[in-house]
Image (cartoon, grey):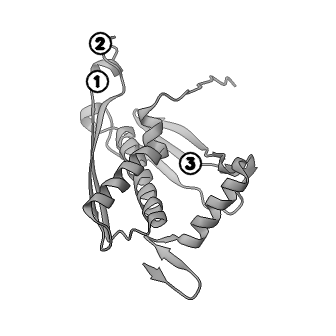
Amino acid sequence: MTNTSSTLTINGVDKQALDATIDAIRETPALAQVTFSLGSEWLDGCHQRSTTGELHQNGELVSSREASYVLESDEPAALLGTDKAASPAEYVLQALAGCYAVTYATNAAVRGIELSSLRLEMQTDFDLQGFLNLDDSVRPGAQEIRINVHAESPNASTEQLQELTDAVQKRSPIRDTLANPVQVVTTLVKK
């Protein structure tokens, strides 16, 4: 825990800013509405490049986000790619890992739990018969995602860390997106 003259930081999270955000959303629930965007271009074979786009909160552009980020994906050679970047499946795991880290850090901060370390080991399984249209009974998506959490805290018991882990599973937006049906709207835009 870091406590400077006016800022209390727990797990790298500004506790005062976190509390202010929670209070602002309680006061104005529309502030909780956030829209992320991304543009993507196919390069060749299984290789594609995406660039993060605008971020909107409460229907308004968030001008404080100055940078955009470039993400590339490809498949391993064993899966017909050229292995120039992480695979989309690995990005799904990365998205979940990133969201878990944010959810752990913020939920721990709310509880006053200091994390001295947090490490996640993740695996996911796919059956390519679904993707390759070889068996209609096999879904093309992941069969299961497994996560081992290694969390250490100087001020929380094992029971408190388990309660935190349970809360993370309930509150992680990306886990919720993966675990529960979400409508995906795809529109072909012709030139």
Q: Is residue 165 above or below residue 88?
A: below
In front: label 3 or label 1: 1
Q: Dot 3: what SS?
A: strand
Q: Is residue 175 above or below residue 110?
A: above
State which tag comes first along the sequence, 1 or 2.
Answer: 1
Viewport quadrant of the N terminus:
bottom left
- Give how far apart the Cα atoms at labels 3 and 2 are: 33 Å
Tell me, for residue 30, which label it has, or none.
Answer: none
Q: Amino acid at mark 1?
A: Leu
Do labels 1 and 2 touch, CB within 8 Å? yes
Question: Residue 120 location in percent, x, y?
Answer: 29, 54
State which tag comes first along the sequence, 3 or 1.
Answer: 3
Question: Residue 4 location in percent, x, y?
Answer: 52, 86
Viewport quadrant of the C terminus:
top right
Q: Is residue 161 visible?
A: yes
Question: Residue 71 location in percent, x, y?
Answer: 48, 49
Q: Dot 1: what SS?
A: helix
- Give how far apart the Cα atoms at labels 1 and 2 are: 8 Å
State which tag comes first along the sequence, 3 or 2.
Answer: 3
Identify the residue position indicated by label 2 in the image.
134
Question: Residue 165 location in percent, x, y?
Answer: 35, 52
Do labels 3 and 1 touch, CB within 8 Å? no
- Give how far apart the Cα atoms at labels 3 and 1 are: 28 Å
Tell me the residue at 72%/55% (across/down): 27
**Residue lying furthest bottom:** 5
Identify the residue position indicated by label 1 in the image.
128
Q: How many marks?
A: 3
Tell me, for residue 51, which label it has, or none.
Answer: 3
Between residues 114 and 135, which one lies in front from this camera angle?
Answer: 114
Q: Could you tell whether 182 is left or right of 25 in the image?
A: left
